Structure formats: C-alpha cells, structure tokens
Image: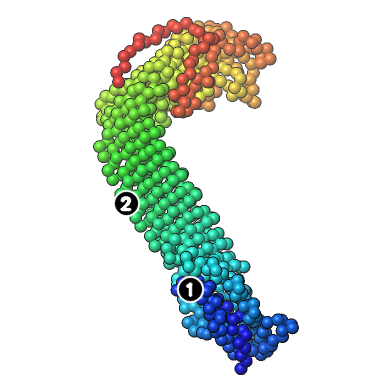
Amino acid sequence: MNRNNKGITNLYGHRIFNYLILCLFGLSVSLSVSAQKDKQKQGAKVYIDYADILRYNQMELPNVQIAKGNVKFRYKDMTLLCDSAYLNEQQSTFQAFGHVDLKRKDGTRITCQRAYYDGYLQTLKAREKVVVRQPFKSLKCDSLDYNMISNVANYFGGRGTLTYGNSVVVADQGDYNTETHDANFDGNVVIHTPKYDINTPTARGNTDTGLMNVLGKSIIRTKRGEVVHTNDGTYNSKTDYMQLNGYSTIKSPQRDIEGNNIIYNSTTGDAEGHGNVKINDKVNKRTMVGDNVTYNSKTGHTEGHGKVKIIDHKEQRTITGEDVIYNANTGHSEGHGNVKIVDNLKKRTITGDHLLYNSKTHVGEGKGNVDYIDYKSKHAFKGDYVHYTDTAAIAYGGNPGPVAKDFSESNDTLFIHADTISMKAFNIDTPQGYRKIFGVDNVRAYRTDIQAVCGFFIANTKDSCLVMYQEPIVWSDNRQLLGDSIKVFMNDSTIREAHILGNALSIEELNDKEHYNQIASKTMHAQFIDGKIRTAQAISNVVTVYYPIEERDSSLIGLNYLETDTMRIYMSPQRQLEKIWTNKFTSTLYPMTQIPPDKTLLPNFHWYEAVRPKDKYDIFRKVARKDDTDIRPSEVAAPPRQQIAN
C-alpha cells in the first residue's frame, strides 16, 4: 500500500467540498477560515489506499504528486475514488480526474468527472456530470463552485437539479448562501414543492422563511388550484400570502384576479389590488374592477377607488364610479364620482356624481348630474337631483338638464332630452297605466328609426302621441320633415303617423348624397309601415322637386319640377316611388345636364344633418336649428308657455 504525507494539506480541500454539500442540503455545519488554518497546521493524514501508478517528479511538475489508475484516497471519514489525481502541497491544491467519486460515512456521495480545490482562495470546483447525494437529497449539475469566504455555492454550465425532501428545483444555474439560507436560481427555473409548482426565468428565495420571489415571465401553480402569471411575484408557502408586482393574474376555481399590483391570501379571503385590477369571485358571483380594490370574499365587503366597477351577478347589479363601497349582505351601495348603478333585476340604471342605494329598502338618492332610468316601469329622468323609489321619481336641475326616455312598449328605446322635464304617472300598477311628460327648451330625441328636435313637446303614453312645437324637425332614415308643429303617433316599436302643420317640408336625401327629393306645402300627412314611409299627402301650395331614376342602372334621369294644390305619394317597402296622384298641376322635366341652378333646391330648403342626433348620447348636444338664412313666417302659433311642476 502506498502512502504519501505530502498530500495531506492538498486533500484537505475534500473536507471543504464535503461541508459545502452538507450546507446545501440544510445540515448544520460551519467552518471559519481560522479553523481551517489551524487544522492545516495539525497535518491531518491523507491515505492513498491504491493507485496503479504513483510518482513524483520535481523537475517535471514541481511539488506535485501524480496518482493514476484506480486511485483511492482516504481523508478522515471521506473516501475519494478517481482515475487520476494531482496533489500540490505547497500551493494547497489538488485535482482529481475521471470517475471522481467521493463518499462519506454519513451517506454523502459526490460524483463528477473533474474536481479542483484551491486552499488559498478557499474555493472548490467540481466539473462534468456532478451528482451530490444524501438520504432524501440530491444535486445534479454540470459545474459546481463554492466560495468559503462568502459562504456562497454556485452551480452552472447546464441544467441543474436540486432535490430535497419532496421538493425539486431545476435551473440552468443557481447559488446558495449557507449562512443566510438565501438561494438564487436563474435560467428556465422549474420548482416543484408539495404546495406549489413554479416556472420562472429567475427565482430568489429563503429556505427558512418559505418566501420565494420570481422574476420574469413566471407561472405559479398552487395545490389549491390557483394558477398565477406574473413577472415579479413573492409567495409564502407557509401563510399562503402572495404579493405580485407588475401586471399579474391569478386564476382558481374560486376566483380570478388580475392587476398591476396584487396582494392575495386564499386562506383569509382577503384580496387587494392596485392598478387596473379585476377580481372575479366565482363563488359569490361578483366581479370587481378598479385602480385600487379591496375585497373579502367571506364578508362580502368591497371597496374600490379609481374607475371602479363592481358586478354582482347574483343580484344582477353593476356599480361603477371613482369611489365605490358595496356590501351584498346588507344591500348598501354608495358611489362618488361618475357613479353608475345598473340593476338588471329591477331593470333600472342610475348614474350621477353621488349615489346612494339600498337594494333591501329600494330607496335611492342621487346628487349631481343624475340619470335615472326604470326600464320595467317605462320611465326615466336625468337631473342634478333625483330621489326615487319603486313607484316614483323626481328629477330637476343640472346641466344640460333632465332627460326622459322610452315610454312605449318598444324594445328600441326612445331617448328624449329637454332643459326642463316632468312626468306624472296614472294607474301605474295596472294595465291601464300611462304617463304624461312635458319637455321645455332644447328638446332632442333619438331612436334608431326616428330622431327629432324642437323647443317644446308633450308626450302621452296613453295614445303613444308626441307633439312638437317651436321649430320642430323629424328625421326617419334618409328623410327629414320640417314644419311649424309636428305630431307623431307611435306603434309599439316604430313610427305610425306624422302630421306636419304649417310650412311643411319633406326632404329625401338620395344615395349620391348630392341630390334631394323635396315636397313643400302648407300641411302634410305621412303614414309609415315598419318604420318606413308608405304614403304621404301634401295639401295647399304644393311644390315638388323630384329626380326620376333609371331602373336599369339606378342613374338619375333628370329633375321634375311640379306645382299643384294637392298631392298623394305612394312608396314601396323598398322606399321606391310607386306612383304620384295629383289634380291640376304644372310640371317641367329637366335633363340632368340642363337643370337650372335655381330649381335644384326649394326656397325654404334646409338640410339639418349637423343638428340631427347621431345616437342616444348625442341628445345632450345643444344645436340651434335657426340661422340667418332660415327665417320663415310662422302660420301655426306656438302653444302658451306652461308651468311644469317638478
């Protein structure tokens, strides 16, 4: 048997490497630098149990002993097997090559292809197919470095797998501090534990506290069924506390959460988010959205700030606002700043600057630009102040003023706005129930099949009649109706009749958007089917401008200018002219290239496209019909100004 005491100091590095592995797997072992130096001076023995070749050549490799072939070292309770080894006592280094296998009596075993220890730098390096094993613990990696000064061990150079107990960490590289127990993993990190699985580019954690911080595009899957997507998140497996920074999502069978900054605890039910937060509580059927939202799934209390939206799917109620407090258990809801409450169960929508509502008592109050719509009872209001119950509502004040909405049984809502508006209901809970609505100044109405503006209106839901005074205009499809007063009768869903009294003018815009068919008379009556005009009668001083159309290519043939006393017009369902009836008349047909400029438009022609309400939100715009070129005598006097009670 060959022994050489010159390798004692060099082989001392094996003991350091063994301590590194013990620390990596949570064993309570530590060494100080001073203790290392003391033990080096003591000269612990190294036993070379076997080597096929053992030689020393001071000229070839100064201070280096070379062992080759089935080399077996022993140092204290460690045994090292390898194919060859270089031992340098003077530089306090050793190198082992080929099938390096280090074993300890406690069961620790390290295998690799190459190992190098530097006693002066106090670093140990293991290379190629590194495997560290202990009972219930193992580390597999390509390269492993350990710095005894900083107490940091580093593995790199390929995928490394760390297994301890029931947990596994796989990463391209990692480091671990044996004193603080902080660990860092980088490069496609995969972590499997009994409580969660993590996929992340980078992980920072501590084995004592249970905290794990992930950085980069990461996925955390907990055993509770939660799936977390985040770029910066911290999770505590001991308390289930989770904090996510930057846009992140949490999905689970109980609830889904997304936002820029999230604090969440699945055990307590507390959830808190900041920055574009969305919480979808699947158990209680509620969805909360806002810049800052706090929620407890057990108490039902929700509080949000900054563009908040709360949807109670069970109660079929949606609340939005800048600041919202909502409790589904008590029925209390409170909102401040651009608040909107949509109650689909009660078929109500309320908006305003400040709203209070209790779903248990059915009493609500709003201040500041309040808009109340009761779709079930077919009444609606808008004003600066609204107080409402299930059977009544009062609205007044505000800018641009109150608004009333659809009073028919139609599914297509008619929205009517006026500076002053009032409603009185009769027999509201009976089949004979009806309402009277009065609107004064800047009246604008919109529905998909009809739009109108005027200065004063009276609506009666009993006979579905809307009477307009003071420069009224009515539009239907591509047709515009003007007169001193207009009376419109509605079916359940569409316009049925229109009567124009005084300075009646009907204008139809053609498809080319450049030419207009026009009829002017003192009075005019029109009948509609399915919202489309089918017949019309013009009475007294009738003047028409009409463009016949070539059926083959839909081109304009010319302009037909006609004057008569009475005219009846019949239209097809496709809005094509079927026939015209008139008594004595004068008429001239001008070819398209020979139309006199003064014949294309009637003297009182005005096309008010800029005034026309474009949608239900456009009814609040104030646009005057009259201008300097629109001055006409008024043959029908406007009704007297009435006092409208609130």
Kindly indicate whether the residue at mark 2 contacts the one at mark 1 (C-beta within 8 angstroms).
no
Q: Residues within 10 Å of mark 1 (few under 14, many from 20)?
A: some
Residue 109, position as x, y percentages in the image: 53, 80
Residue drawn at x 48%, y 12% as measured from the top left: 504
Image disc number at residue 65: none
Residue drawn at x 50%, y 49% as measured from the top left: 246
Where's the N terminus, which quadrant?
A: bottom right
- Residue furthest out toward the bottom: 1
Q: Give above or below for 627 relative to 106.
A: above
In the image shown, does 530 or 70 lie closer to the viewer?
A: 70
Q: Is residue 334 left or right of residue 237?
A: left
Image disc number at residue 30: 1
Query: Which residue has dot 2 on it?
Result: 298
Amino acid on which the number 1 mark rests in the picture: Ser
Residue 192, position as x, y percentages in the image: 48, 66
Label count reads 2
Residue 100, position as x, y percentages in the image: 60, 80
Disc 2, SS: loop
Residue 125 showing in the rendered view: no
Q: Is residue 504 left or right of residue 188?
A: left
Residue drawn at x 35%, y 32% as measured from the top left: 354
Based on the displayed image, in which of its 4 quarters is residue 171 positioned?
bottom right
Disc 1, SS: loop
Based on the displayed image, in which of its 4 quarters is residue 468 positioned?
top left
